[in-house]
Image (cartoon, grey):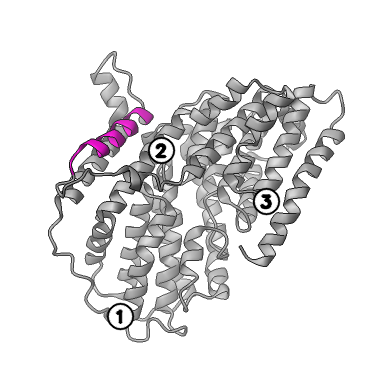
Amino acid sequence: MTGRFRRIAGAGLWAGPAAAVLVGLALPSDALPPEGRIVAATAALMAVWWVTEALPLAMTALVPVAVLPVAGASPLERVAAAYADPLIFLFLGGFLIARAVEESGLHRRIAVRILGLAGRSPAGVIAAMMAATAFLSLWVSNTAAAMVMAPIAASLAAARPGGSTAGSGFSPALMLGTAYAATIGGMGSIIGTPPNALFAAYMREAHGVEIGFAAWMAVGLPAVLVLLPLAWLVLTRLCFRIGSGPMPLLPDAGIPMSPHERRVGAVAVAAACGWVLRPALERLLPGVALSDAGIAAIAAIALFIIPSGTGGRLLAWDEAARLRWDVLILVGGGLALAAAISESGVAARIGSASGALAGLPMPVLVVATALVIVGLGELASNTAMAAIFLPLAGAAAAGLGHDPVAFALPVALAASIGFMLPVATPPNAIVFNHPSVTGARMLGAGAPLDLIGVAVAVAAGMLLGPLVF
C-alpha cells in the first residue's frame, strides 16, 4: 500500500465511526424505528470503511455480525445466515473448479489454442488474446485470467520487432486489451466476478427473484459479446496505431493433453452443462431438487475423488486452501447488510424518499447511478461499490414503482467496469507493470470505454433483464 493510500485508510478508520454517529444523530426520531437507525448508521460505517479500505474488505464485511445483534437490530441467527447463502456455495464451487483448472495447466492450453486460430495479423492476435482472456475470465477470477494471459501477451509484444518499446502502438493495445478482456469476461457468468454473485443473492433475499447460472448468462454473455468487440475497436482503431506487418509464429500447442488436464476439463464441462441445463434436468427428473449450488458442490467433491493420473487427485487441499476465502466473506457481509436494510425499515424509507425523483425517466436514473458507481469504482473496490449500491438501488426502484431487477441489474453490471486507472481493477494493475502501458495511455483508452461500458450495461440490464427474470 502506497503512502497516499495508507493515509486515506488511516483517515477512513476514524471517518467511518464519525459517519455512523452523524447518520444516527441526523435522522429524525420519527423517520425510522430504533433498529432502523442502527442499521443506517452501520451502513454508513461500512460504506466509509469499504471505500477507503480502512480495514481489509472481508473484515468490514463482518461488521453486521459484530454490531447488529449486540445493538438489538437483528438476531444473530438471522445475520449469520446471510454468510451461508446458497450463492456463496455456488461461488465456492466455482472457485474450486477454477483452482483445479489453474493447477492442471488447462487454462494455458486453452489460451494458446485460441491464439493459434488468430493468424498472423496484429489486429487478429489482439482479438484472439482478448477472446481467450475473456473466455478464461468466465470461469476463473479476472485477476487469475489476467495473471495467466499477461505474460503471454508480453512475450507476443516482445516477439514483434519494436513491439515491446514504449513507442509502439501494438504493445499497449495488446496489454490493455488483455486487462480489459479479463474485466469484461467476468461480467458473463455468475461466478465471473463478486458483483454478479452479490446481485443474484440480493435479488433472492430481498425480492424473491431466483437468478440461476443460465439466467445470468442470458444477460451477461450478450453484454460481453457486445462490449468485447467494442473494446477491441477502441484499442485498435481509435487509440493506437498497431501496424499491419505479419506477427512471428505463435507458441506451439502440439503437446498432447495430460490425463490430469482431460479429467479436470471433463469435470468443468460437466458442471457448466449442469448449470445451463438445470431447468431441463428438473423437468426430466421429477422429485429431484437440483440447484446451481448443489451442482457446484458435486463437481467440487468430484475434484477431490477422481485420480489425476499422475499419482494424486484432480485437486489437493493444499491447493484449494489458497482460495480467495475473503471474497466469500465479503459477499456474505453484503447480503447481511442488505437483509438488515430491508427488514429494519431503511429500504422503505429510501423508497419513500425516492418519490422526489418520480418525475425523471427511469433510464436517466439508471444511467446516473451507473456513472456514479463506475466513477467511484475507479478509486475504490468494485465489489464494495456493488455491496453498497445494490440495496439502495433496489429500495429506490421499489419506492418509484419500477421493477427492482431492471433497476439493480445495470448497477451490478456497471460495478464491474473500470478501465481508466491502474487501481480500478487488479487486471489494470497487472498490465501496468509493462513498460509500454503508461497512465496517460490507460486513461486515454479507458475513459471512452467506461462510457461505452455504462451504455452496454444499462442496455443489457434494462432490455434483457425483464425478459429473462
Q: Amino acid at mark 3?
A: Ala
As helix, strand or loop, the secondary structure at mark 1 comes to helix
| Among the two numbered marks 2 and 3 on one chain, the one whose residue lies closer to the N terminus | 3
| Front: mark 1 or 3 | 3
Cα distance between the residues tagged 1 and 2: 38 Å
Which residue carries the number 1 mark? 159
Residue 245 quadrant: bottom left
List the residue tagged with mark 3.
54
Q: Is residue 63 above or below residue 348?
A: below
Q: Secondary structure at mark 2?
A: helix
* Residue 101 % position (x, y): 29, 49
Does the residue at mark 2 contact the one at mark 3 (Cβ under 8 Å)? no
Which mark, residue 403? none
Range covered by the magenta-colored residues: 293-307
**Where's residue 215, x and y in %?**
40, 34
Residue 442 drawn above or below residue 450: below
Q: Earlier in the sequence, mark 1 or mark 2?
A: 2
Compare residues 49 and 352 and report the one nearer the observer: 49
Please indicate whether residue 243 sits to the left or right of residue 41 in the image. Answer: left
Please give the name of the residue rendered at 46% of the width and 55% of the height, measured from the top-left corner.
183
Residue marked by disc 2: 92
Q: Secondary structure at mark 3?
A: loop
Nearer the observer: mark 1 or 2; the answer is: 2
Q: Nearer the viewer, residue 334 or 399?
A: 334
* Separation (CA) of disc 1 from disc 3: 43 Å
In magenta stretch: residue 182: no
- Residues 159 and 52: in front is 52
Left or right? Give the position of 351 relative to 385.
Answer: right
Residue 369 shown left or right of residue 12 in the figure: left
